[in-house]
Image (cartoon, coloured by chain):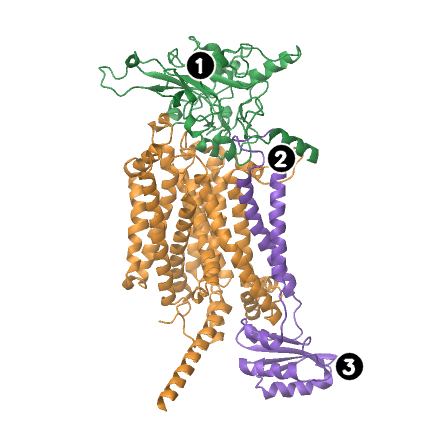
């Protein structure tokens, strides 16, 4: 099956995508208010926690980290999808990414913004967060650059700003289209301002192409390093269950995994809501699903490697932590994580389900639940069963405050994403045109070759 | 920020601790705890509460693991089939080990915990933003976080007890990490008082609160590099060295009958506290 | 003689290409194919470069400079701040440890590279750009536009060339 029909009129592409920017239906407003309400729950919990102290999160000694760190890693992980699609597949000349990378990039940006919230929520003295920033001061005090948490801060700042720039630069030609076709109100002003006077001249396209490629080349090592640095929060510590060399690639694999699953979810939703069936086609969905399946197998492999290396090592403490994960307080969640992360994606291997929308929607959501559980299972069991026996005497479960804030973050993300989809084109119009153009060229070449062959045959 | 400052600091500090060529001078504070002498009376813990203005968190929070005792008495029972299982607990007073290569120091994002020249792990309350990475990385879990704002909480220091608070110590608000400091306020006060006499502190002139109240003298505290100090002599008698991850005496054939050891020293934090094992009935 | 702009819109890429080739090969008074000719299109056409002549792209020099500067600045800042402390030993590590400094240098190398690339893009592409005197929204939809600047008397010649190559529309700037 072809990824996209080659006879789609370019004017139609413009029209269809611009239609998604029209005034939203009532359902949109209902959902966005729900999202804000959910976010409000999170804000309420955070205000309570800010005023009272982190004790209300039910954290204690030694369980000093909880769902905030787990969710932080989850959201950073989800952000890798956009880079995977925009940058990695771009370098691989995988054209099928073209209709879908725009919303994936947006997802990256908003995931990073959501992850930033968790950094703030996790700190004991949030109002002094700026101590972690390298600003010159008269005491000559700088943050501790040796700390992996600080590398996190720098890496995520780099990743967030680079993603926003990449998203924006890639959107300039589309913003020009919006400017040319939307003539009224604040939108006209916005698009005129943001499109920077783009007119599609050869000089502009030439430089655009090179810049896009260059930034893509930078974004790939950046994305890999960002999640490796987040993994170093754990790998660079001494704690059993954390001090594992394979953590950086394991985390990157997990990030790509949850990002791809989220892409499938949003793909299905956007396709239905905006009627983008011609652009976000089933063959493209199939390719995304296959990619997710491949990544899920990589993640499964790295996961099993972690268990195997611990099991066959002489590190009794690490073995004890692994046993505790499988049989201790958190065991149901650990087993669920393994099931959702390794067994459930096997459904995606069957052709029958690779384009079956309800199954895919369910599976992609389940995969992300599994990935969230994975992050929690990395954080919690090590605290429960660390080096020091005195700390093994009590269980710890997150309080409703923690769950409320985690829940609220999904509302924030949804809100941002919905606003984006209504203000900016969520399908890249010029890239879809390119895709159709190259498709038509390829078909024409094929026809020419066939004609030549048949002529030769005739003689 | 001057270049001279930079170069001076560089040349002075470019070696790792523990080091031979740039040793601690003139102080390296260390402790030795004799677990055979320890009766588990908890006087040291109470004294620490009094000396350092530690908040009493109450039964409920204590059960949740949110206690603030900088020195804690741990109880261990051997798992043999004795008639009365609760009998015969071994007591282990555990406080911040003031590790030479402390895992907590490298991971604080804002540099609120550092190593002082006299061998202590410092915790700077003002700088701490409460990321709790230091506690996550501590193998001993001796760092305590202020989960609530204790100075403004009721019944933390019931009415009359407010009068016993130590004016030399700040009160910590919520969101700040704290831990045992080897009573640094007493050390600094002692250093100041002998400075006028132009000498350094002698053994016994500064006592930590826990050492001061221990009825059996189980806790010995002092300057490890002063050959006349009790703690130096104890470490030497037990053949425990500061800057190794496996003691020489343990590598010798047959092991060693000396009681002195350090906890989790194979993780290489180089703790400054030596424990002397309790003499067990089975060993005689 | 005053110069005027003409904008021709084509829906057939090959015809547009042929028109440009003809314009480049011709010598028309008051019209310099290198400077007065701009091709506008809805998607990028690398083939355009072939028949417009070689115009180098300088963005990657910006990238190189930015990345190197970012990395160097980061390393200097970090090492300088670590070395300038009074006595902030941490964890038995050296005062200026290489592994953590390397991580941050790498990140800032990328940061510098990306930021300066974007800056370079804006400079090299001339954005934000003043809008051309003649523009058609069709250019952002599905048609190719050729904007030429020429003296008034040559306008007729150019129009003829455009019409020959099936231009759908020819816009002309109003006379001054």
Q: What element carries label 1?
A: helix
Q: Can residue B250 be seen in this view?
A: yes
Chain C colour as displayed: purple
Q: Residues within 10 Å of mark 2 (few under 14, many from 20)?
A: many
Instruction: Measure how far apart labels 1 and 2 are at the Cα level.
Output: 39 Å
For disc 1, the marked residue is: B44
Residue A124 image point, x, y percent: 50, 34
Q: Where is residue C107 in the image (x, y as percent from the top left)?
A: 55, 48
Is residue A424 placed above or below B72 in the rendered structure?
below
Residues flagged by tags 1 and 2 on a common chain = no
The residue where tag 3 is placed is C1
- Relative to A373, is B159 above or below? above
Q: Which mark is residue C83?
A: 2
Of B7 and B175, nearer the camera is: B7
Residue A194 found in image quarter: bottom right
Query: Tag 2, which chain?
Result: C
| Contact flag, marks 1 and 2 (Cβ < 8 Å) | no
- Left or right of C145 on screen, residue A9: left
Q: In this view, does A269 lie to the left or right of C62?
A: left
Discs 3 and 1 carry the same chain letter: no
Label 3 to label 2: alpha-carbon separation: 68 Å
Q: What element carries label 3?
A: loop
Q: Is residue A335 depicted above or below B25 in this figure?
A: below
What tint does the image give chain A? Answer: orange
On what subunit does the disc labeled 3 rest? C
Residue A404 sits above or below residue B182 on the image: below
Q: Is mark 2 on a helix, strand or loop?
A: helix
Q: Residues within 10 Å of mark 3 (few under 14, many from 20)?
A: few
């Amino acid at each position: 099956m072809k990824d996209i029909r080659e006879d789609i009129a370019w004017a139609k592409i413009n029209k269809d995508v611009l239609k998604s920017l029209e005034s939203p239906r009532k359902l949109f407003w209902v959902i966005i208010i729900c999202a804000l309400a959910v976010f409000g729950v999170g804000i309420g919990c955070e205000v309570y926690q800010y005023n009272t102290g982190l004790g209300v999160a039910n954290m204690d000694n030694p369980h000093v980290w909880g769902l905030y760190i787990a969710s932080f890693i989850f959201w950073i992980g989800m952000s890798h999808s956009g880079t995977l699609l925009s940058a990695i597949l771009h370098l691989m000349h995988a054209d099928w990414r073209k209709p879908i990378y725009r919303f994936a990039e947006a997802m990256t940006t908003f995931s990073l913004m959501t992850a930033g919230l968790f950094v703030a929520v996790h700190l004991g003295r949030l109002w002094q967060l700026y101590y972690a920033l390298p600003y010159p001061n008269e005491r000559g005090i700088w943050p501790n650059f040796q700390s992996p948490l600080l590398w996190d801060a720098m890496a995520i700042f780099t990743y967030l700003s680079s993603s926003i720039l990449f998203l924006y630069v890639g959107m300039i030609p589309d913003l020009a289209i919006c400017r040319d076709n939307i003539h009224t109100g604040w939108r006209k002003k916005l698009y005129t301002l943001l499109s920077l006077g783009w007119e599609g001249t050869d000089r502009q396209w030439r430089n655009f192409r090179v810049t896009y490629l260059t930034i893509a080349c930078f974004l790939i090592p950046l994305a890999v390093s960002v999640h490796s640095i987040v993994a170093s929060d754990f790998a660079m510590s001494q704690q059993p269950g954390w001090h594992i060399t394979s953590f950086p690639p394991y985390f990157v694999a997990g990030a790509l995994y949850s990002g791809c699953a989220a892409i499938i979810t949003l793909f299905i939703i956007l396709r239905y809501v905006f009627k983008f069936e011609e652009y976000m086609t089933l063959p493209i969905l199939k390719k995304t699903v296959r990619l997710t399946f491949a990544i899920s197998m990589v993640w499964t492999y790295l996961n099993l490697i972690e268990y195997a290396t611990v099991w066959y090592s002489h590190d009794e403490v690490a073995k004890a932590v692994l046993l505790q994960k499988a049989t201790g307080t958190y065991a149901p969640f650990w087993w669920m994580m393994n099931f959702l992360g390794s067994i459930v994606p096997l459904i995606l291997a069957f052709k029958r389900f690779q384009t079956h929308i309800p199954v895919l929607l369910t599976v992609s959501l389940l995969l992300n639940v599994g990935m969230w559980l994975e992050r929690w299972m990395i954080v919690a069991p090590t605290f429960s069963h660390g080096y020091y026996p005195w700390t093994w005497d009590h269980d710890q479960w997150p309080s409703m405050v923690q769950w409320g804030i985690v829940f609220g973050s999904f509302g924030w993300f949804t809100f941002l994403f919905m606003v984006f989809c209504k203000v900016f084109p969520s399908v890249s119009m010029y890239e879809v045109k390119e895709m159709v153009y190259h498709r038509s060229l390829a078909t024409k070449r094929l026809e020419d070759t066939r004609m030549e062959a048949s002529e030769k045959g005739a003689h | 920020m001057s270049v001279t400052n930079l170069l001076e600091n560089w040349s002075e500090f470019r070696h790792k601790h523990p080091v031979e060529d740039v040793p601690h001078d003139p102080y390296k504070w260390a402790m030795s705890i004799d677990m055979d002498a320890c009766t588990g009376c908890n006087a040291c813990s109470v004294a620490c509460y009094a000396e350092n203005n530690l908040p009493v968190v109450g039964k409920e929070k204590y059960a949740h693991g949110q206690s603030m005792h900088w020195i804690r008495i741990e109880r261990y029972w051997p798992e043999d089939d004795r008639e009365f299982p609760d009998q015969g607990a071994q007591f282990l007073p555990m406080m911040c080990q003031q590790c030479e290569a402390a895992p907590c120091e490298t991971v604080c994002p804002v540099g609120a915990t550092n190593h002082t020249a006299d061998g202590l792990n410092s915790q700077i309350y003002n700088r701490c933003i409460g990321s709790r990475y230091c506690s996550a990385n501590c193998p001993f879990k001796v760092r305590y976080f202020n989960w609530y704002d204790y100075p403004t909480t009721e019944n933390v220091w019931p009415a009359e007890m407010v009068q016993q608070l130590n004016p030399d110590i700040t009160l910590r608000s919520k969101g700040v990490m704290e831990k045992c400091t080897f009573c640094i306020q007493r050390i600094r006060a002692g250093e100041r008082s002998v400075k006028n006499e132009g000498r350094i502190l002698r053994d016994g002139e500064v006592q930590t609160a826990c050492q001061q109240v221990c009825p059996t003298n189980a806790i010995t505290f002092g300057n490890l590099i002063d050959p006349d100090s009790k703690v130096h002599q104890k470490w030497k008698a037990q053949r425990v060295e500061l800057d190794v991850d496996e003691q020489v005496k343990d590598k010798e054939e047959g092991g060693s009958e000396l009681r002195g050891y350090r906890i989790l020293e194979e993780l290489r934090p180089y703790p400054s506290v030596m424990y002397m094992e309790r003499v067990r009935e089975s060993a005689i | 003689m005053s110069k005027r702009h003409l904008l021709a819109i084509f829906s057939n890429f090959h015809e547009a290409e042929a028109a440009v080739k003809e314009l480049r090969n011709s010598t028309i008074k008051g019209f310099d194919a290198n400077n007065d000719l701009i091709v506008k299109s809805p998607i990028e056409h690398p083939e355009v470069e072939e028949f417009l002549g070689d115009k180098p792209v300088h963005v990657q020099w910006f990238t190189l400079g930015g990345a190197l500067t970012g990395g160097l600045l980061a390393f200097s800042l970090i090492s300088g701040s670590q070395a300038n402390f009074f006595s902030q030993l941490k964890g038995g590590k050296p005062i200026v440890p290489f592994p953590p400094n390397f991580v941050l240098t790498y990140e800032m190398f990328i940061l510098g590279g990306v930021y300066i690339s974007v800056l370079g893009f804006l400079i090299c592409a001339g954005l934000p750009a003043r809008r051309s005197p003649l523009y058609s929204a069709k250019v952002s939809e599905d048609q190719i536009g050729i904007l030429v600047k020429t003296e008034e008397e040559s306008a007729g010649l150019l129009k003829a060339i455009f019409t020959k190559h099936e231009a759908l529309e020819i816009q002309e700037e109003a006379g001054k």
